[in-house]
Image (cartoon, rainbow, N blue to C red):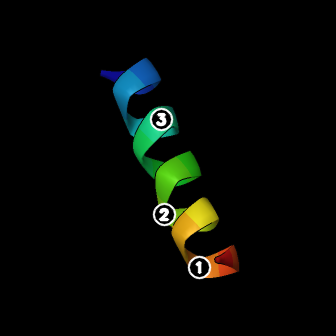
Amino acid sequence: MKAKKCSFSGAVELSRLS
């Protein structure tokens, strides 16, 4: 669960940066 949350957070950050 923690790993999944981290991955999701990373994707969100990437999307925001893009």
* Near-viewer residue (6 or 14): 14
For image coordinates 49% across by 52% down, the residue present is 11
Give the secondary structure at mark 1: helix
Q: CA distance from mark 1 to mark 3?
A: 14 Å
Give amino acid for label 2: Val
Q: Is residue 2 left or right of residue 14?
A: left
Query: Is the Cβ of the residue at disc 2 closer than 8 Å to that at disc 1?
Result: yes
For image coordinates 51% across by 36% down, the residue present is 6
The numbered dot on residue 12 is 2
Give the secondary structure at mark 2: helix
Q: Is residue 13 left or right of residue 17?
A: left
The numbered dot on residue 5 is none
Q: Nearer the viewer, mark 1 or mark 3?
A: 1
Query: Looking at the image, is mark 1 or mark 3 earlier in the sequence?
Result: 3
The residue singled out by tag 3 in the image is 7
Q: Is residue 10 above or below residue 14?
A: above
For image coordinates 61% across by 65% down, the residue present is 13
- Horizontal and vertical percent position of residue 12: 48, 63
Q: Which quarter of the picture shows residue 18?
A: bottom right
Q: CA distance from mark 3 to mark 2?
A: 9 Å
Query: Looking at the image, is mark 3 or mark 2 earlier in the sequence?
Result: 3
- Horizontal and vertical percent position of residue 7: 47, 35
The image quadrant where one finds the N terminus is top left
Q: CA distance from mark 2 to mark 1?
A: 6 Å
Residue neighbourhood size for the residue with mark 2, other residues' Cα within 10 Å, grouped as few (<14), some (14–19), many (≥20): few
Residue neighbourhood size for the residue with mark 1, other residues' Cα within 10 Å, grouped as few (<14), some (14–19), many (≥20): few
Give amino acid for label 1: Arg
The residue singled out by tag 1 in the image is 16
Q: Is residue 8 left or right of residue 14?
A: left
